């Protein structure tokens, strides 16, 4: 092939890669304005590891922390952009765009001049970019670990295209290490690299270096697997043999079902109603095992005729292996199939080559348009949390967690009565789940339905007696009903379960204050402040207690600190006027009361205090 023809083919490939990037940008643009959803709150907003790493980045890599590179990325985003979801979504989209470019470069380098005349292969990055099954990984911020892991997986595959054996395996091994730091699924990556080396007929076979490198990689993956299983065993998390077998059979069934989604990605669902197989003798599960073995065999036999297609087919099977080996809370999750969509794009491209001439030119465009339309309908689901869980319930109406998450989403949007109905449905589906009972009880307390609140919270406590937050909610319920003594016992029980829980100490202080035990209340507020010294609400509580104990100077200092943290805290400004008045600073008190009335004209207490000041001055 001439240099001119080579440049033309390269330009075509680059144009397709650029088109893939632009298509992904356009189709995923709506997620930039989307809020946080589901695990984004616990994984980012209230994650202590992310918060600590935002202040001290090296803490993300403390042993034995999980996914340290992902924690570091989230901490970097938090440090730079705070808690604005748009920037987190933008970062996820950028990772996806980088993965598209890396996939295009890897396919071009694998095929080299052998694929120069293939008019279908340039479509691979575009089909990867817009496959609807990747939408969860790209649109759901907490899935950034999948995107980050995939980045290093693709870098490792690219490194394997190096001509010099030592460099190719060294660079691939380094990339594999980073992938493992991003997500534990990368434990299987050394096997993927070895499989890629077997399938790539251009690999260097002339010396001992490749076989030595493969041996090292196999030893590394075996060592990592052994350490991982040892860690689970020491934590007592490894299942008994029967459950382990049922888990493996279930994942075989899931693998076959996922093939269907790769081929025809409709009815995508954020939380599928998938359960463990009923028993180890389940015939459909064993049929799935046979089909999985058939896929692996087909990949092995295909490697001599079409190495790239063989690698793609084997890659899908290999990526499912980690889920066969460990017990999973979530049996079937779409974001795990992110790289499988690239494997599907490769298989689709290699299959389209077999079509007659005219169809071979039309089929890639038809598949691309279909994928784009399906993705265009899926992305908006991720831009609204209520819509996301309503969509999930339509497809998995028997899933208690989906109803619970809908309740949480409705509650966040201020729709309390629909949220209650969603929580009640979740409890009907799974009455023995303590968190579902807790969420319903907490909402009933907020709605003032004391009977429902107590019934559900007591049921939650009975199901799991060691959760401190249930004791706290029971204490708050007693406070709402004017039962300060009973509330105190619940808060003390919560502190025994979680001594470092700031809210428990703060609420204990409130219950003691209700009973006029101000010295003890002050001690509780101070303990809470030691845990969270930057809480404006705690500074306000400290100010109230200090005023009650006739210590206006100390109260003034706490109230001023509360206003520095939260200038809009009107109660703190009013109490600051009270403290100033007791210290004889009438002008300071007058200024504080006027500031309260400027933002809250209906505050009669501030108006009365201001009038009282005027009378004192007149007298």
Image (spheres, rainbow, N blue to C red):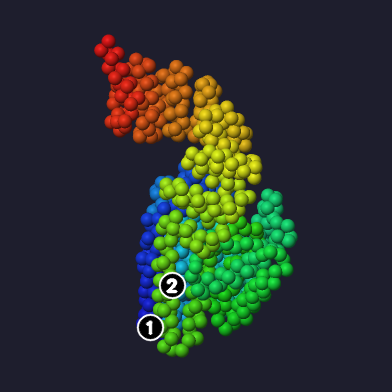
Which tag, 2 or 1, sits closer to the chain's start?
A: 1
Up-down: is 254 above or below 479?
Answer: below
Which residue does the image show at 39% across and 34% down from the upper left? Answer: 565
Q: CA distance from mark 2 to mark 1?
A: 31 Å
Q: Residue at the spot x=43%, y=82% of the render?
A: 363
Disc 2 designates what residue?
Answer: 371
Image point (50%, 33%), residue name:
480
Name the one closer to the observer, 346 or 170: 346
Lateral position of residue 68 relative to residue 132, left or right: right
Farthest-out residue, left: 618
Q: Is residue 163 left or right of residue 379?
A: right
Q: Secondary structure at mark 1?
A: helix
Q: Nearer the viewer, residue 525 or 44?
A: 525
Q: From this view, report whether residue 230 is shown above or below residue 378.
A: above
Question: Measured from the top left, where is residue 418 in percent x and y?
Answer: 46, 51
379 in relation to 85, above or below: below
Would residue 385 be found to the left or right of residue 470 on screen?
Answer: left
Q: Residues within 10 Å of mark 1 (few under 14, many from 20)?
A: few
The residue positioned farthest toward the top in the image shown: 619
Q: Nearer the viewer, residue 226 or 109?
A: 226
Q: Is residue 515 left or right of residue 614?
A: right
Give the percent coordinates (x, y) of residue 219. 66, 63
Q: Secondary structure at mark 2?
A: helix
- Residue at image mark 1: 5
Up-down relation of residue 360 to residue 311 (above or below) = below
Q: Position of residue 195 (x, y in %)?
A: 60, 72
Location of the N terminus by quadrant is bottom left
């Amino acid at each position: 092939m001439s240099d001119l023809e080579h440049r033309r083919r390269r330009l075509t490939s680059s144009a397709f890669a650029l088109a893939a990037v632009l298509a992904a940008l356009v189709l995923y643009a709506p997620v930039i304005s989307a809020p946080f959803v589901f695990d984004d709150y616990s994984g980012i907003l209230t994650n202590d590891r992310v918060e600590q790493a935002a202040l001290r980045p090296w803490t993300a890599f403390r042993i034995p922390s999980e996914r340290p590179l992902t924690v570091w990325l989230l901490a970097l985003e938090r440090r730079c952009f705070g808690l604005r979801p748009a920037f987190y979504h933008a970062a996820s989209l950028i990772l996806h765009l980088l993965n598209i470019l890396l996939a295009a470069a890897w396919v071009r380098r694998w095929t080299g001049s052998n694929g120069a005349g293939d008019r279908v292969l340039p479509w691979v990055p575009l089909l990867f970019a817009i496959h609807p099954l990747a939408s969860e990984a790209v649109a759901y911020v907490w899935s950034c670990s999948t995107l980050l892991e995939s980045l290093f997986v693709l870098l490792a595959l690219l490194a394997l295209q190096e001509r010099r054996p030592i460099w190719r395996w060294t660079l691939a091994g380094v990339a594999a290490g980073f992938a493992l730091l991003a997500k534990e699924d990368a434990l299987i990556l050394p096997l993927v690299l070895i499989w890629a080396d077997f399938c790539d007929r251009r690999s260097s076979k002339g010396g001992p270096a490749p076989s030595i490198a493969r041996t090292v990689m196999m030893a590394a993956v075996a060592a990592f697997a052994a350490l991982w299983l040892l860690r689970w065993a020491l934590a007592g998390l490894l299942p008994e043999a029967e459950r382990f077998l049922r888990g493996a059979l279930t994942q075989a069934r899931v693998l076959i079902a996922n093939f269907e989604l790769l081929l025809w990605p409709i009815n995508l669902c954020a939380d599928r109603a998938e359960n463990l197989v009923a028993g180890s003798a389940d015939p459909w599960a064993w049929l799935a095992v046979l089909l999985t073995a058939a896929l692996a065999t087909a990949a092995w036999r295909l490697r001599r005729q079409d190495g790239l297609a063989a690698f793609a087919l084997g890659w899908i099977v290999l990526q499912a292996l980690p889920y066969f080996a460990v017990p999973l809370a979530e049996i079937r999750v779409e974001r795990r199939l992110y790289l499988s969509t690239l494997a599907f794009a490769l298989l689709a491209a290699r299959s389209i080559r077999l079509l007659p001439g005219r169809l071979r030119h039309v089929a890639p465009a038809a598949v691309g348009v279909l994928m784009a339309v399906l993705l265009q309908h899926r992305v908006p689901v991720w831009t609204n949390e209520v819509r996301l869980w309503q969509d999930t319930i339509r497809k998995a109406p028997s899933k208690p967690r989906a109803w619970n998450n809908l309740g949480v989403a409705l509650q966040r949007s201020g729709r309390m009565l629909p949220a209650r109905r969603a929580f009640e449905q979740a409890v009907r589906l799974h009455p023995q789940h303590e968190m579902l009972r807790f969420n319903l009880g907490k909402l009933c307390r907020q709605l003032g339905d004391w009977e429902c609140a107590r019934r559900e919270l007591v049921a939650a406590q009975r199901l799991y007696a060691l959760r401190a937050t249930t004791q706290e909610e029971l204490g708050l319920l007693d406070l709402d009903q004017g039962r300060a003594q009973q509330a105190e016992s619940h808060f003390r029980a919560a502190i025994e379960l979680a001594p470092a829980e700031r809210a428990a100490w703060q609420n204990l202080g409130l219950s003691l204050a209700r009973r006029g035990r101000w010295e003890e209340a002050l001690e509780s507020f101070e303990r809470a402040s030691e845990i969270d010294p930057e809480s404006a609400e705690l500074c306000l509580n400290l100010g109230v207690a200090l005023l009650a104990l006739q210590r206006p100077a100390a109260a003034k200092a706490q109230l001023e600190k509360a206003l520095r943290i939260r200038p809009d805290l009107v109660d703190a400004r009013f109490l600051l006027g009270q403290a100033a008045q007791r210290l004889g600073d009438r002008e300071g008190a007058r200024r504080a009361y006027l500031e309260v009335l400027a933002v809250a004209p209906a505050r009669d207490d501030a108006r009365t205090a201001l009038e009282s000041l005027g009378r004192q001055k007149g007298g």
